[in-house]
Image (tube, rainbow, N blue to C red):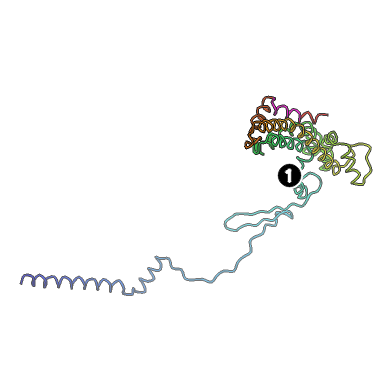
Amino acid sequence: MSRLASVAVRRPTLLSSLALTLVALVLLLAPSSPASAQTTGKQVGTVSPTAPKDPTAPAVDTASGPTGTSTSSGATGAAISLDLRSGDTSGDGTGPVQIIVLVTLLAVGPAILMLVTSFTRIVIVLGLTRNALNLQGVPPNQVIIGLSLFLTIFVMSPVISKVNTEALQPYLDHEITQQEAFERGSLPVKEFMSKQVREGDLALFIDLSGDDRPADVMDVPLTTMIPAFVISELRAAFIIGFVIFIPFLIIDLVVSASLMSMGMVMVQPMTVALPFKLLIFVLVDGWQLLAGSLVRSFVR
């Protein structure tokens, strides 16, 4: 009986809780009044849709003159200005044509460095020296090119100083035009090349060009002087490389003959000869002799 009484007591409690839950759902889902809807819309910030406005052209500032245009953004106050200058070919280097020429010269600068300076001979001789020592990657290419570059600057320093004094500084001070600066700057370079070029190579390219042989070598145009100078530099570099190869070739022959006489046929002569080559090259101070000989070869 007590168990039935407890069940009878629990059932009204469950029914009352379900009733309260249904009443709460009805109140939440009931539609609100128009006044409350307007109030809620104002609180949320609902805005009625409006038609799009026609686009307006930006304001143009006509006070900038014919060389530029200026546009303003209205309320923000930000301004964008564009200045288009007309080309100036008066020779002061500020026109678009002069800028294009300067950028082009910077792009072909490495080729000019190799062709009209001592760089060609120096880098070839250093590369042949590495091959004579049978060293594949030592010293690396970066070291050889860097050493060649600084030796070139050392050899060409009188020419560079003369070009700077006679051509570059007057041009930067607006004392001479671009054409005059080029003519003055090319004279020291042409003088340097004329001292190193062989007469046979120069005569060859003069004959190939079809021009008459000038009385003075300084009257030869650069288009004829430069290829003749490059050929002469290649010939001089190969001669120096041949002289460097001879002692190392003798070491290879001596080591090879010694290994053959001892019956050590399986041992590579290059492996045995390499330490002797390095030892002899260090004992005679080969880098000092090589650098000194290269610099002295340009003194005439």
* Rendered location of residue 258, percent (x, y): 67, 30
Measured along the vertical axis of the image, is residue 119 above or below residue 16?
above
User: In the image, is residue 27 part of the stretch drawn in magenta?
Assistant: no
* Residue that label 1 marks: 106
Residue 149 in view (yes/no): no
Residue 128, can we see it?
yes
| Residue 13 screen position, x and y as percent | 16, 70
Measured as percent of width and height from the top left, residue 32 is found at: 34, 73
**Nearer to us in this view, 116 or 232:** 232
Residue at 49 percent across and 71 percent down: it is 49
Q: Quadrant of residue 52?
A: bottom right
Left or right placement of residue 197 versus residue 80 in this view = right
Which type of secondary structure does the marked residue at label 1 adopt? helix
Q: Is residue 290 on the magenta stretch?
A: yes
For the residue marked with disc 1, what is the amino acid?
Leu
Residue 230: % across, % down: 81, 40
Q: Nearer the viewer, residue 253 or 213?
A: 253
Say if 59 sits above or below 23 in the image.
above
Nearer-the-camera pick, 134 or 139: 134
Q: Residue furthest left?
A: 1
Compared with 77, 26 (above or below) is below
* Residues drawn in magenta: 284-293
Q: Residue furthest top?
A: 283
